[in-house]
Amino acid sequence: MLLRYIFFRVLMLIPVSISISVVIFMIVHLLPGDPIDNLIRIGSSPGDRALLVTKYGLDQPLFVQYFRWVGAMFQGDFGEAIVLRRPVADLISYNLPFSLSLGAMAFAFSSVVGIILGTISATTRSALVEQFVRGFILMGSTVPGFWLALLMILFFAVQLQIFPVSGAKGWDSLVLPVLTIGFGGVALVARVTRVALMDARREDFVTLLHAKGLSSGTILFRHLIPHAMLPVVTILALRIGWILGGAVTVEFVFGRPGLGSLLIRALGQRDYPVVQGCLLMLALAVMLGTLIGDVAQAAMDPRIREAKT
Amino acid sequence: MLEVKDLAVAFGSIAPLSGVTFSLAKGETLGIVGESGSGKSLTAMSIMGLLPMSDGRVTSGSIVFDGQELTTLNESDYCKLRGGRIGLITQNPMTSLDPLKKIGTQVDAVAILHLGMAKKKARANTVDILHTLRIPEPALICERYPHQMSGGMKQRIVIAMALAADPDLLIADEPTTALDVTVQAQIIRLLDDLVKQRGLALLLITHDMSVVAQTCDRVVVMYAGRAIEQGPVLDIFDNPQHPYTQALVGCIPRDLKDGEKLTSIPGTVPTVLNYPEGCKFHPRCTRAQNICTTVQPELDRNGDSAVACHFAGASI
Amino acid sequence: MINIIGKKIGAISWLRRSPLAKAFNSWLGKIAGGFLVLLLLTAIFAPWITPFDYAAQNLMNGNAPPAWPHLLGTDQFGRDVFSRVIYGARTSLSVSVTAISISIVAGMTLGAAAGYFGGIFERVVMTIVDLTWSFPDILIALIFVAIIGPGLTSTIFAIAIAYLAQFTRLTRAQIVRLKQETFIEASINLGGKPRHILLRHLIPNAITPVIVIGMLAVGDGIVLEATLGFFGLGAQPPTPSWGAMMSSGTAQLFLSPWVIIFPGMAVAATVIAVNLFGDELIRALDIRDRLKEA
């Protein structure tokens, strides 16, 4: 049943990926000026130019160009970086692991701490704890990530000198970026968990669980939390992209290598093949994240497994 | 077996329940009838110790179950009682099962918790019970999820959960209200059989007088949060004392003679927020006098029956 | 005369009873709303409030810590941070409000059309909208800036596009719900023209939640403007914007942290106030359920 669901869910990704790749492909063509000028470095010989025209088939109709572009990517050819003068594929394969490790850590941190905080705020009877968590949720969902990153650097790295200011050497260089991204992520997860738990507690079946003689603790951990996790997983799946988005800005501030830093630098240098490559990878990550979230949800909820197949 | 005396419940300053008194013996079926909002379910929840924790509490009176005072019982002892010695059947089977857990797991949990059974043994126990409830292919049903079953089937599962630890008392709170008429009859017959086979005590809460007539040995009539009349089912039906009960019985369509009219009760049930002074029924009562507007009549015992009315008896 | 007074009193009591006034009832609403009003006044009257010219350089007094007369210190060029933060409010607020207004108008048009006409059109629009919905706003904005290049105008459009999905979804959900209500069905059956039904019945009934979400989105827009500005893709020097100020401040992060701390605090305080006030407004209008639909 679950396998069937996964199969159909993956099938649905195909049109989505096609539309995304078209948009990203069009970037170069929507730019003002001749696309070739956007793809070539200044001072190249006319020979280089001709080579590029044939490589990208720029004399061909747009859709032929698109298919060539996609075809090349399937063979691992993402084009050549204009400024950095290296294959984009190399740049991506160097930077991707840094982004993945940061994203995964930040995601895990956000989910675990967010769920715990949300549960505490929904179950506690202490107004103080509740106010604190609510305040935290408000701060976390409003304070801009890059500014928080700068404050983190000022406080932990410069004042206290516990963690390195920037870079990606050693595990401790991950702590501040993860905390920074996690701040917003935790707030998001905590907020959803809180609301979902309070909703779950009002469900009819909870009365019967009490009537079965189960203790409040058992009911919370065995029934309410799994129930509350459904909307949490939905939101996490939808917002995996937002956590990655946080990574884009935070990487840059901490001077970590990664797709985000690469993208922002490339945007500044108008290095369009790199921009395309990075956007494509980030879009892919968002799609995969959403997919994993949906599958996790189907694994948890028998009603979804059946409804969609 | 169960002895409720002068029970009163309050939510903050609102007191929706007061002066509820009745008792229930082993092997007996007691019906609690009344319109919605009369405090029937609240009575059941007080016995189960499941008043909404935030502000609902028992303010006075006592509930004694098998020699044990429940109003002062601590939570962990109460947990042993619930599901173990007192089973509850709730109103709406569509929403009373955890949608994420398999049927078997949900029923097994009761025997595991209260009878200390191992998982396998608990499952065998579950299959047995489902079988006695006339559920076809019980082993297969155990592997299913609630959303794959009909309302009547779910209600049987709820009954199975209530029975899984072999309790002494079963509280059924409007067990058939949410079901189709044909299924209603099946469920009522099932409960009736269970009481007879197992010697259970059954507290049946309903607003359906015909269900009461079919199954109950004795009846408690509730109105506006008070028990106003009780007695053996035949007495209540044939010789009701309280004007409200008389009106209620008058509402049952029976083989009417020519020209005889089906009566209805004028006015509406007061809500908790606007309970009248004195007898709560007096604004709708045809027999009300001055005293009724000021003095709350006490429950007056007479053998097995009791009635709370200043002018009890005298028929219409 | 009496008539005029009567009208005035009527207007005042209407104002008192309006949801906007109700949002000021709680103390949180008072603080947040008061802050926003103050911020708005500051932005409007910036030239009369600022003690210094925001662009005046004084290299002799660069990176000066907060002290009299430079209350919030100076940046590397000796420009007064306080004056720049106040002028930054102008840039940030106007960029965000303009962008969100564009987004609301476009989103409502798309959403109303999709919800009203349905069919293939709805399917195409909603597929695209749902697609952009799952991407972080910063990524959408970056794609857009990649296409039309950095600057304030592209920032406005980038923000408008980043939040377009939100308004389209919300409007569509409302229109779809309203369409099933009897009075709309009746006017469709009576042969009302789509334009009339949309403009006279559907959109007026759907607009409140959209406006409230729009107000909350202004807060998000400010953060997005600041982020783009910080990356050097938004406002270009010497225009003072909160994000751009922080961007130029990174070089002196350790030397003069106040250049970064104060504009960031301005962003954070504004966004928090917007959110708190928005929450009060949602409560005053009692539309939480309608927001959940989208």
Image: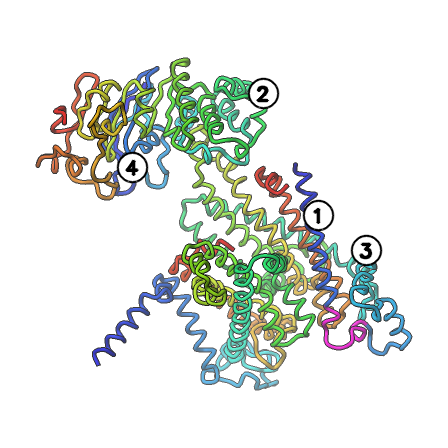
Chain of the residue on which disc 2 is drawn: B
For the point 72% across and 54% down, which residue is it? Answer: A170
Disc 1 element: helix
Residue type, numbered disc 2: Lys
Identify the residue under disc 3.
Answer: A74
Q: Residues within 10 Å of mark 4 (few under 14, many from 20)?
A: some
Mark 1 highlights which residue?
A: A11
Query: Residue B209 is drawn in which quadrant?
Result: top left
- Residues in magenta, as a range: A27-39
Q: Disc 4 marks which residue?
A: B37
Q: Hey, what amino acid is under mark 1? A: Leu
Q: CA distance from mark 2 to mark 4?
A: 43 Å
In percent of width and height, residue B165 lies at 46, 20
Work out how far the residue at label 2 is from the one at label 1, CA to CA, in angstroms: 40 Å
- Tell me which residue sits at (65%, 73%) in the image: C232
Chain letter belonging to callout 1: A
Q: Earlier in the sequence, mark 1 or mark 3?
A: 1
Residue contact between numbered discs 2 and 1, judged by CB atoms under 8 Å: no
Amino acid identity at mark 3: Phe
